[in-house]
Amino acid sequence: MAESEGSSAGVPLLTMRGVHKRFGPTIALKSVDLTLFGGEVLALIGENGAGKSTLMKVLSGAHTADSGAMAFDGKAYAPGNPLAARKAGVAMIYQELSIAPHLSVMENILLGVEPGAGPMVSWPQMRARALQALREVGRSDINPAARAGGLSIAEQQLVEIARSVALGCRVLVLDEPTSSLTRRDIENLFSMLRRLRAQGLGIVYISHFLEEVRAISDRFTVLRDGSSVGEGKTADVSDEDIIRLMVGRNVEDLYPRTDHHPGEVVLNVDKVAGESKPVSASLQLRRGEVLGIAGLIGAGRTELLRTIFGLDQIKSGQLSVFAYHGPAAPGQRWDQGVGMVSEDRKSEGLALQMSIADNITLSNPHGLGPMGLVFPSRQDAASRPWIGKLSIKCASPRQSVGDLSGGNQQKVAIARLLHHNADVLLLDEPTRGVDIGAKAQIYQLINELAVGDPASGRKPCAILVVSSYLPELLGICDRIAVMSRGLLGASRPVNEWNAHTLMVEAVGQETQLTETRA
Amino acid sequence: MTQVIENESKTSSPAKTRSRQALAGALEFAIRLAALGVVFGAFALLVPGGKFVTASNIENLLMQSAVYAMCGLGMTMIIITGGIDLSAGSAIALSMVVTSMILNGGVDGTGAQLQAHPFLVTVLAVLGGIAIGALVGLVQGSLITGLRLVPFIVTLGGFTTVRGLAKKIAADQEINPPPNWLFEHLMNPVQGRTFNWELFAPGVWLTIAMAIFAAAMLRYTKFGRRVYAIGSNESTARLCGVPIHRTKILVYTIAGLFTGLAGVMEFSKLNIGQPTGAMSYELYVIAACVIGGTSLSGGVGKISGTMIGALIIGTLYAGAQQAGWAKEDQEIVIGIIIVAAVALDQLRDRSRRKS
């Protein structure tokens, strides 16, 4: 059997020794050692910015290492580009899927290696080989003639994996593969990975989520600040051990709590319905409190925030912010003191090509110059305090936001609300794709904003947080309400909830858990 | 080996999906055909005395459309890759000039030694017209890939440069070569007072043949599928080993061949080499592609759609003239119809995706 000859103990399939990589003055990888055997799943764990993506790019040929050695199948391995790596047998599945949406599934699987004599394409052979690859990944129910763009994200991911399998890849690297999958999709993905593992493939699984690491990996390697700081058998260590390795310290006070003192109602949502979602949502948000909204992806939480903020049309129901009643456009909402942080900072939340200062002052250009003029020097001056307060790591306020790490980008998005002096904060997945260190800072900030700062005369803010990460909601909120299929349930104090009861309410009448990580 | 074949029984019938997709494609085509019918019907009513629905008029209309269609074959491929060619009209003019100069023996007919060999000069004139078009495509394709410039900029430069070249080599004159058997027939109407069973001028048949050839190339060759892959997701195509640069250069060169052939046909219609001819043809050709369902953002497009698109543009053009509209009114109406057609198409597309 393939698994016995390939698994552990034997000769490693892939090794990296002392890999070093710098970009200008920044050292991305100091000294990385990694060993992967055939027939195993190796979890690569580390905070954002620890160097995981750089390491994987070195492995998949997108970057070349400055020094260090790699060996694949006993031979020296140094791919010049991703294509060379694929041809050698190392395939990478990125978070951003690489699919030609207009082409059929079979064409996507065999792209670049289409079967057929000479210049011609043989459609029957194409179908047969694509079916073979789909069968190997256990999904022969996917129609090879279907348009790839019409498939679900999970199925598109599978098509990409089938593409690597069809090419005969022996090492599969998956970068945060579950970030947009439902619970059931994750289960399917895991069973497929186990199947590929049994066929002798070496799989590198990059993830933030320790539950997933536990569920799928045989061994792990932890990366911190560009160095590999630990490795071992997953079954032998506790979560605490891994976290300690990741952050280099104990994370005790991830969720800081000071007493909040809710004041007057500032946002009143009464039976609000949008175009398709929300179906009906009612809530009251008070100054000085953090209200969390839990629920499954697609339950309508984002749409609720968008409707409140005027990005989506309100179909029925009453909405009032302070003394303002009725619907309003986003620009008016800003004027009323409402600010929103989008869940999608790349395409909606931030102008990536523009500078940090531009992004922070975008909604509130007051005081940046006379007669509506905007002076860059004043933008910078206005931004600096926020850069300091939120400890945004950057060279200058003129640096473009696209150059920053995810965590720092998110801080810029939040800094905009602070610069605007918004009183009502709508935060949609405020810590998505943010490393643990930055998460802790964001939680701290949310807490401070809810408390207010009498010294500087800053009143407590009212904060509405949507999140799919339940420990976070339970950690930072005063009250939580659950949204299910467009309906928002009644909010209850946080101590009346736990992860289980939240999930039960989120799935509503459905008996099966089909959703997000709990 | 423990090869698992558990899901075999669940396999949804691919044959059924395939036929459903074929049906959707046929419906798509039928809708475009119906749109053509509407435009044609409108002019049939607008043009007095039923003159619009005569065999000779329909042939005329087809000949007008054939030039757009021929050029549209290449334009469709370019647009599928996510590119554009703004130089097509200028390249048609250059091709006309080159063809006429070979027939004429230079601008003023001084180098007329070749005229002693009527067959040879004819072949050379055709090949010269096609080759100059291909050369323009090759140069532009190389600039786009080699210098990593966007196609819009390169072909915008080509738009004026190629036009200038055409004028320069023709010494800014019209070239009036002696009569030639091929060019007198290629785009000469065959329908007169009585019905002719040849149906259309040879140029129209040539266009139909080339359209079938181009459609087959897009469907049944690796090159053709890679054209779609590049337009759909270029980085994926690169990752999968599709030779992006070579494929793109080939696309622009092949498109140049078709454009050159369109120039030969345009010349044959007039039998005069006009360096200022085929003005703004590129816009009509792009409009034909887009009306035919080719997406300017790449990845989507069909030769059959472009053919209908070219017919719609040709019908509008010929119909507006025959209805006796002023030139400026024609321009206004054609512009509005182009935008409306694409808007309708997208609206339909969006509502279909929703359902």
Image: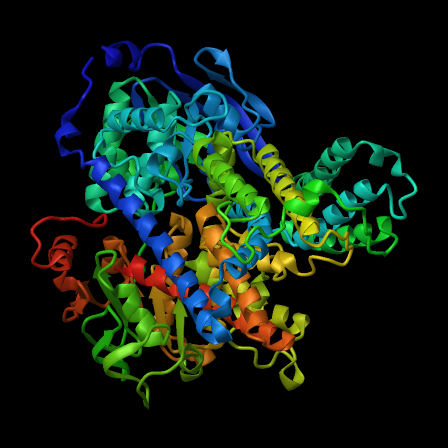
Count up the numbered dots: 0
At horizontal 14% and vertical 60% (from top left) the residue drawn is A497
> Hey, which residue is sitting farthest right in the picture?
B110
Please report the residue visible at 46 percent of the width from the left and 36 percent of the height from the top.
Answer: B216
Q: Is residue A117 left or right of residue B265?
A: left
Find residue A287 and report its horizontal and vertical position in percent.
30, 79
Residue situated in front as seen by the camera: B57 or B221: B57
Which residue is the extreme one toward the front?
A: B194
* Residue at screen point 11% across, 55% down: A504
Relative to A198, is B160 on the left or the right?
A: right
Residue A362 locus on image (x, y percent): 54, 72
Decide if residue A121 is on the left or right side of residue A188: right
Among the 4 quarters of the image, the one containing residue A302: bottom left
Image quarter for residue A134?
A: top left
Residue A170 lies, with reference to residue A140, above or below; the image says: above
Q: Nearer the viewer, residue A113 or A468?
A: A113
Foreground residue, A238 or A301? Answer: A301
